[in-house]
Image (tube, grey):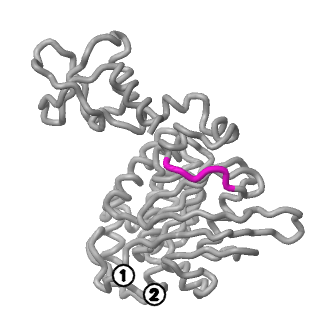
Amino acid sequence: MQLGTAATVGPVGAARATGEPAAAEVAFDNATKVYPGQSGPAVCELSLRIPAGDICMLVGPSGAGKTTALKLINRLLDPTGGDVLVGGRSVRSLDPNELRRRIGYVIQQVGLFPHQTVEGNIGVVPRLLGWDKRRIHSRARELLELVGLDPDADARRYPAQLSGGQQQRVGLARAMAADPLVMLLDEPFGALDPITRARLQDEFMRLHGEVRKTVVFVTHDIDEAIKMGDHIAILREGGHLVQYDTPDAMLAHPADDFVARFVGADRELKRLSLHRISELELIPASSTAPYERVSSEATLREALSQMLPDPDRPYLVVDRDGRAAGLVTVELIGRSLRAEERG
């Protein structure tokens, strides 16, 4: 992996012309950070591996070292002990400026340059990498369309002319502009209203489905972490890692009381939102006529909301085209979840 090399970027999601991977593994190897004048570490011997292309959510209370851990990846901070590796290479061995040009970074306040247009903001890193104006213009238009903005109407606007949600979309586009190997997001949606926040969460997950990047995402919101993460790392005060797991495994088997309290007493309900009816082994349906219908794309939580008024009745599961896939019951959903827990 040659950080700092300007890769040729074609259509979003296309393979790089240089053969360089689109995402890189991030690994913390006993990484420790102690700030001068502090008696204890902000991050303490943190070890975890984030597979290339996965979303890792860093969660924990204030003072747990989440943002500190994030900044160790792009060398805004250097570890006091241990190491951080990107694509198998120690960040200590890489020039900080070149490293940061290959890592997208989005913060809560967005940090757009007010004197530059939207297109100018998106082109900041590509200009540093020596891209020509035509290529930057093309990439900006491509990314504006990808994040749900209008290239013709929005490219020439200034940040002050945008809503908070639009500014965050531009921030995401800027972070993706040079086709980074890793994206770091520090509570990017934390200051937004709940409706805009939910829309941007969904939009980001759609983007990630199209352009697989390794994402390290700091949040205080466990529901956001469960919704968006492939893995969740829960830290406690002093930067100690308590549990690193998939959302479903963490909800089913919290490592200790701290994790159980953090994920909430309604963790079984949260698990229901992670699974869809299509994942179940359904009961064969001999006839479609007498049954109420439920979509195969519904989450178990959505299905149960529909089914609980009459919990003994079987429901017919249908796909997007209305074709019958089988029958589901409240009892079947419960059995499936219990079997997963035992497994």
Name the residue: 47% across, 42% down: 248
Asked if residue 204 lies left or right of residue 9, the reply is right
Q: Which mark is residue 2?
A: 2
Which amino acid does the dot numbered 1 rest on?
A: Glu
Q: Residues within 10 Å of mark 2 (few under 14, many from 20)?
A: few
For disc 1, the marked residue is 20
For label 1, the SS is loop
Q: Is residue 82 above or below residue 297?
A: below
Q: What residue sits 35% from the left and 33% below the top? A: 299
User: Does residue 108 appear to the left or right of 23 in the view shown?
Assistant: right
Left or right? Give the position of 301 relative to 197.
left
Residue 7's x, y, as percent?
37, 84
Dots 1, 2 in contact, CB < 8 A: yes
Q: Which residue is rendered at x = 60% and y = 72% of the image? A: 73
Q: Position of residue 172 (x, y in %)?
A: 46, 62
Badge 1: residue crowd in 10 Å (few <14, some 14–19, many ≥20): some
Residue type at the position of mark 2: Gln
> Is 91 left, or right, of 167 in this rendering?
right
The quadrant holding residue 317 is top left
Residue 297 shows in the view:
yes
Q: Which residues are magenta?
A: 241-246
Whichever of callouts 1 and 2 sits on the residue coming sooner in the sequence is: 2
Q: Which mark is residue 281?
A: none
Q: CA distance from mark 1 to mark 2?
A: 8 Å
Of residue 113 and residue 37, the one placed in the foreground of this image is 37
Q: Residue at x 14, y 12 (%)?
A: 290
Element marked by disc 2: loop
* Residue 122 horizontal/vertical position (percent): 44, 72
Residue 229 colored magenta? no
The dominant secondary structure in magenta is strand
Tell which of 52 and 199 is nearer to you: 52
Of the 4 image quadrants, the one containing the N terminus is: bottom left
